[in-house]
Image: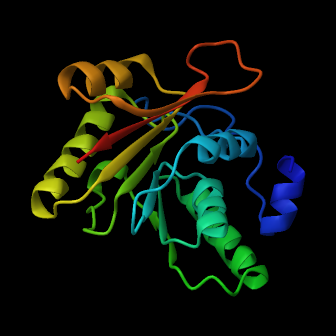
Amino acid sequence: MNEQQYEKQLNINTSGFQYGFPKLVKYHRYEPTPYSGLDQLFEHYTLPENACLVDIGCGKGRVPIYVHYQFQIPVVGIEMDQKFFIEAEHNREQYLKKNKKNSASIQFMNQLAETYKIADKDNVFFFFNPFSIHVFRQVMNHILDSLEQKKRVIDVILYYPAPEYMLYLQQELALNFLVEVKLADEKNENERIVVFRIS
């Protein structure tokens, strides 16, 4: 399906970009994750058992709603921008009107990613370069701390991974790829998806 077909199927409106600049330099502008990229990711990657996906910087809610629809698992979207959060909540309501059968929870939270308290059930974290490496480190520290509290498999998905994110995960944390998806019809080496597994 193309972008418009997915939006119609899910009964949501998540297209468009953020124009201008975010109020805080360390946070990046909104850009929706292409549905075609999500399709390619899940052709090569299998979610862990009892998955609960957290989209860090979820914008209007596209990724959580897509994953909820495709896999019937609980999802959480974290969004600092109140306008996008309101749009994500509206998209959730519209989606649930059309897709009532899925009983898994779908939740959006209006807060900074580094203030989100990671739940024991959270085990898949999705990032589309939402912020600077400084904030990414803070969020990763919270993820690693949560692993100390509750042992589980945790997957970290990076869509169009920033080089500094990759250096941090591979060199400082010594993590290896679980999956690497080179996106079709893309020429830039950053135009890929990588998944790291922490266990």
Whole-percent x and y of residue 169? 29, 28
76, above or below 1, in the image: below
**Residue at position x 50%, y 79% in the image:** 105
- Tell me where residue 157 sits by quadrant: top left
In the image shown, does 192 or 19 lie closer to the viewer?
192
Q: Residue furthest left?
A: 148
24, above or below 162, in the image: below
In the image, taking residue 147 as reference, residue 37 lies left or right, namely: right
- Tell me where residue 123 sits by quadrant: bottom left
88, above or below 81, in the image: below
In the image shown, does 39 or 168 lie closer to the viewer?
39
**Residue at position x 16%, y 64% in the image:** 150
- Tell me where residue 132 sits by quadrant: top left
In the image, taking residue 20 as reference, residue 168 lies left or right, namely: left
**Residue at position x 73%, y 46% in the image:** 35
Count of marks placed on residues: 0
In the image, taking residue 124 as reference, residue 32 lies left or right, namely: right
Whole-percent x and y of residue 175? 26, 30
In the image shown, does 112 or 186 lie closer to the viewer?
186
**Residue at position x 18%, y 47% in the image:** 144
Whole-percent x and y of residue 32? 67, 43
- In this picture the colour scheme is rainbow
In the image, taking residue 8 as reference, residue 130 lies left or right, namely: left
Whole-percent x and y of residue 89? 61, 71
